[in-house]
Image (spheres, rainbow, N blue to C red):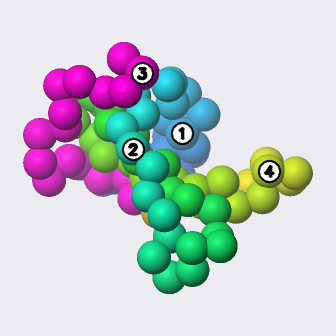
Amino acid sequence: MQALDFDRHDVLNQLLALDASEYMETFIDDKDNSLPPFFAFGKMIKNREVYIKAKIRDRKNCKVFCVSFHFARFKLPAQKPYA
């Protein structure tokens, strides 16, 4: 996220700040449907739409894997499920 002048700590802070109103959808892992699902979020950061996809790897040890953190390729939906 060089265009945002972000480092990994900034990305972590954005992940921790995610809100239910930014949630878009859930994806089943197509590599193995027994693995935890992916959760997609969309949010505005520095006046840019950013797409974030993450999965909870280990609830017990609070481990989250961020799969995607990039500018949205398509316009984010105006209506989100919990907005």
Q: Residue at x 31, y 27 (%)?
A: 80
Whether residue 26 sits left or right of residue 9 in the image: it is: left
Q: Which residue is mark 4?
A: 59
Label 2 crowd bin: few (<14), some (14–19), many (20+), radius 10 Å = few
Element on which disc 1 rests: helix
Nearer the camera: disc 4 or disc 1: 4
Can the viewer see residue 7? no
Whether residue 22 sits left or right of residue 17 in the image: it is: left
Residue 53, x across and y down, in percent: 43, 53
Q: Quadrant of residue 65?
A: bottom right
Q: Which residue is mark 1?
A: 15
Q: Which residue is mark 2?
A: 25
Residue 22: say if magenta: no
**On-image quarter of the C terminus:** top left
Element on which disc 2 rests: strand
Q: Amino acid at mark 4?
A: Arg
Q: Which residue is mark 3?
A: 82
How many marks the image carries: the answer is 4
Residue 68, x across and y down, in percent: 39, 59
- Residue in front for this viewpoint, 47 or 30: 30
Q: Amino acid at mark 1?
A: Leu
